Image: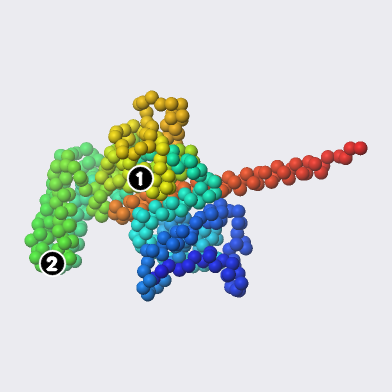
Amino acid sequence: MKPQSDPASTRNQGRLFKDNGPVLSDFIDMKHPLVRMADTMQWERFESHWRTRFSDAGGPMANSGRRVAGLLMLKHMEALSDERLMELWITNPYYQYFCGELRFQHRIPVNPTTLVKWRKRLGEQGMEWLLTSVLESALTSGALKRESLSHLSVDSTVMEKHIAHPTDSALLEKMRCKLVAFLREHALGLRRSYSREGPRLAQQIGRFAHARQFKRMRRALNRQRTWVGRLMRELQRQLDQLSDTARSDAEALLAQARGLIEQVKNPKTKNKLYSLHEPNVDCISKGKAHKRYEFGTKVGIACTQREGFVVGMRSYPGNPYDGHTLDDMLEQSEIITGVEAKTVAVDLGYRGHHETKAEIIHRGKKLSKRRKQRLRRRSALEAMIGHMKNDGLLDRCHLKGLLGDALHAILCGIGHNLRLLRAHWAALLFLRLLSWLISRSGALNLQSRPMTA
């Protein structure tokens, strides 16, 4: 069923009727940055886009678009989990005002698991629409200039996935457990499960590796691989006893087991499996001394050179070459902002032939003084990526699958823009307070001067 109406749209009408709950605008500071951000956001446009995702059929009415959009914004602005966000929401009146509530609420608005369904329903296109709304609010408030949208900086980073550090012994042991669980769930024959020897052998392999006894470690790995192969063939022999749905699940599990056995047998094989529940994780080397390899997805980031607002953010599974993603990044930023890029400052990883008409600025060619300034400004993007990982949620993605990677990347960009907006409104409030103090001190000095004849 269609979503509920925005509670803030009936704010004035609600004052005409008596209610037990206190009105938020009566006891909160209306100059607070969150209040200013909420008042400048164009929630009506997002509500119209929100309603197209639902049918007119009967059923329980969905939550208002402003409420869910505000929750998603607050989550990534403050780097909170879904559960922690709900705990803080019922104690913070500014969070409630930002989400469109008229009166102070004592119960959580939605169950934390509902946000998972909302993210899937909105999809990548809905998140891009939300990013557009945030950028329009920045333009309205003066935190972002319209001419800045045509001069961008582009870079890439790794968004790590929420998985354990992959080792062959741990993956083989997990695969053994999954095969045994599947056989028992469908009441299939199981000669031996290796439930006692498996965990012990996996622990022993770790000790062999720590002691650098690699021959003993490889012999133990071969034993593990043999056990997984036996269980795999046992399941394969009994495929005819399964239903069509269970057979498809079994074939997917068997394909995963074959790939795992092959990569343990041949360590130099490509397209390795690093996690059983996240098979699309890539191993990416960025040349860092403290972290040689990162397991996740490559993410491209496009931001304005002057203010540092994110205008495009997209995940790229498969670890493609950076130069092959530049045209796609500029196309996304043009769709979100409606402004075509004129100059793009990049590093040497983006060299090559591009179809874009924008001027690509990088090291290694003769540049004017203005172009050199833009190239130096590109290094600010490195610090922004660090802030998105330390102050936001870009350091680790907890959402599942390729869709989860795409949604999480855009939401991290939205959270970064909201933190910049909050800092802008806080700076304006400080300047007003400072100017008031200066004028007040000047008036007091004039009153304290003695009268002259």
**Residue 108 x %, y %:** 47, 66
Nearer to the camera, 112 or 309: 309
Which residue position holds label 1? 331
> Label 1 sits on what residue type?
Glu
Nearer the camera: disc 2 or disc 1: 1
Q: Mark 1 falls on what kind of element?
A: helix
Q: Is residue 350 visible?
A: yes
In-image side of 380 versus 11 (left or right) = left
Q: Residues within 10 Å of mark 1 (few under 14, many from 20)?
A: some
Q: Residue furthest right?
A: 453
What residue sits right under mark 2 in the picture? 242
* The disc label shown at residue 37, or none: none
Residue lying at 59% horizontally and 46% vertically, measured from the top left: 428
Task: Report how far apart the C-alphas of labels 2 and 1 lie in the structure.
Answer: 47 Å
Residue at 40% over, 42% down:
340
Q: Quadrant of the N terminus?
A: bottom left
